[in-house]
Image: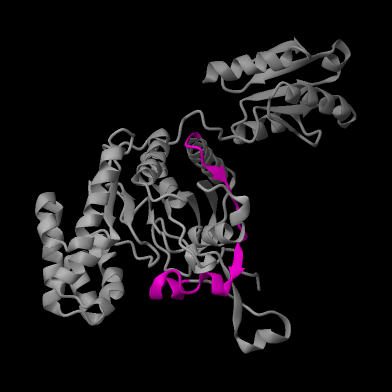
Amino acid sequence: MAQRTEPARGMRDFLPADIRRREYVIGVIKRVYERYGFEPLETPAVENLETLMGKYGEEGNQLIFKILKRGEHEASGQADLALRYDLTVPLSRVVAHYQSKLPRLFKRYQIQPVWRADRPARGRFREFYQCDVDALGSTSPVIEAEVCAAVSDALTELGFNDFTIRINHRQVLTSILNTAGISESLHGTALVAVDKLDKIGADGVKTEMSGRGVEAGAAEKLLELFEVLGKDREKSRELLDSAGVAAFENLQAIFAHAEDTSAGVRLRFDPSLARGLSYYTGAIFEITVPDLAGSLGGGGRYDNLVGMFLGQSVPACGFSLGLERILVVMAERGMFPPTLATTPADVMMAVFDAKDTPHALRVAGLLRQSGLRVLVYPDADKIGKQIKYADSLGIPFVAILGGNEIEAGTVTVKNLTAQTQATYDQAAAAGAILEGLKQRG
């Protein structure tokens, strides 16, 4: 009986076309992040279990992929390692571990996969890439404005023009929860429910909050407060305690700084934005587009997370773009540039006779030295079969090397798109093909 060949649920294989699109998007995001002075960082796929546990809240802990102890300990069912859940906690560990080697203001970007034992859905997978940008070492609202601007520039360069950056503050949320009459012991669990508002709606949030022990009247009042705060910023001050007012002023400072960046026209205050991760301490963000349930990314300030490893507070703030969701939306909207490479080569080297292969390899080398991508057909099949193979892969040119060409030091180049061909000196063939590629656009 043949074994199953599909990947594990929530995981995917990436074929060449998929990889080209992913590398294009990553390349754009990386270039934008570097323009803002962020440096690259990578961390291991596997972390000590204790590094991850207790950092993401109750629901997050349940989604961590744990790794059983190896060898004789495997039968115990105990775990001591886990797959990376996000890139923020590993960053915090790195900053705590290498503090003496890092600058006081450390700006880093990190583009790597993470793993979550979540239920797969459209644009949601168990293995997926995050494209993070973070700054550690400053409490200035300039940091929030800049990370928002960096992700805004990245999405704009990818072709997005209808996204919104929703912003809120954890202390504003705490103040609203208090005003609604929700006890402090239930704040965390209430926020988990509120974080799903855009997915399950107000009635769904009420039901979930009730199941989590929040009284129906308090849940109803909370949702009413969200509506009031979302419409009237000035009235918001009257509904907040002193800590909430200070947080609201922090948000206004972020808005003021963002006005001078590309993020200014994108920012929208949303008092119901919660972000489920428990390590956020200040401003929180989320990017949405009209045709995607869920977000393209999110982030916020987490001033206490590094302190869990270091024993002292280090201010930190970051934003994470979700590569998979960006790819889903771009594919559905047809946003990838037409010039994006879709073939494995620019030209295929064909030969009539196996004894001529050394000559073909030499000419292929000359073409590659000019920057061309060259695929050498390995077998001396009929020339029609070789051309048909090149055409099936979308390779636009075929370089043909027969006995006459070898003797004359030439090569015949067939343009499969225009259905024309011409013979060139071997040293001049690369220029002719490059010009042909330029004319194709």
Q: Looking at the image, which is closer to me, 76 or 272?
A: 272
Where is residue 34? Give x, y as percent. 52, 37
Report how many numbered discs are placed on residues in the image.
Answer: 0
284 to the left or right of 205: right
Where is residue 276? Give x, y as percent. 34, 65
Is residue 200 among the parts visible in the rendering?
no
Seen in the picture, residue 262 relative to 120 is either above or below; the reply is above
Seen in the picture, residue 264 relative to 217 is either above or below; the reply is above
Question: What's the image's color scheme?
Answer: one colour
Where is residue 434? Give x, y as percent. 64, 18
Residue that appears at 20% across and 79% down: 214
Residue that appears at 62% across and 31% down: 391
Question: Which range is magenta?
Answer: 35-63
Where is residue 30? Give x, y as percent. 52, 40
Residue that appears at 39% across and 41% down: 146
Q: Looking at the image, which is closer to me, 108 or 311?
A: 311
Seen in the picture, residue 257 relative to 6 is either above or below; the reply is above
Name the outermost residue toward the right.
Answer: 355
Residue 43 counted in the magenta span:
yes
Residue 84 counted in the magenta span:
no
Name the outermost residue toward the bottom.
Answer: 76
